[in-house]
Amino acid sequence: MWGRRPRRTLIGFVALLAVSVGMLVAARLVRGFNSELLLNIGASVVILAFSYVFFDPIFEHARKGRVEERLRFDHEHSTPLTTNSNLPSRTG
């Protein structure tokens, strides 16, 4: 159950969180416009990190479900060429 996917999500979350903490610390050290810019971008990256953790597994599950459903549909609604009598004969 704890395969490659949760580990990759955790690594992505930690990386985004580290970037955001770095930006927020830098925002405290500088003054003026750069401070406000780093603060806004750092806060946005925090939101992005949490969104990645919560929404990425949901979208991954939806992508897998759609692929499996499509394969099942193709299998149920296809007819083999050997049983199709409407095809022209190559010998005639």
Image (spheres, rainbow, N blue to C red):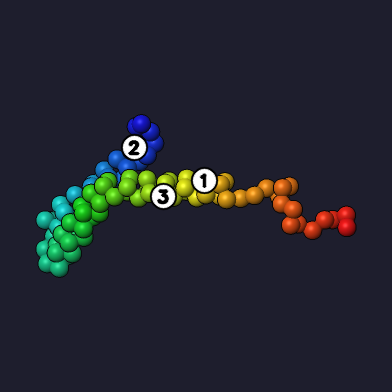
Tell me the residue at 71%/52% (across/down): 84
Q: Which mark is residue 7?
A: 2
| Residue 19 visible from this viewpoint | no
Question: What amino acid is labelled 3 in the image?
Answer: Arg
- CB within 8 Å, label 2 to label 1: no
**Marks 2, 3: nearer the viewer:** 3
Label total for image: 3
Label 1 Cα neighbours within 10 Å, binned few <14 / some 14-19 / many ≥20: few
Q: Quadrant of the C terminus?
A: bottom right
Q: Earlier in the sequence, mark 1 or mark 3?
A: 3
Determine whether, in the image, residue 4 is placed left or right of residue 39. right
Q: Return the x and y of residue 48 as percentages of the image width and height.
A: 25, 54
**Marks 1, 3: nearer the viewer:** 1
Q: Secondary structure at mark 3?
A: helix
Determine whether, in the image, residue 59 is placed left or right of residue 24. right
* Residue furthest to the front: 85
Question: What amino acid is labelled 2 in the image?
Answer: Arg
Label 3 Cα neighbours within 10 Å, binned few <14 / some 14-19 / many ≥20: few
What residue would you read off at disc 3?
63
Tell me the residue at 23%/49% (across/down): 50
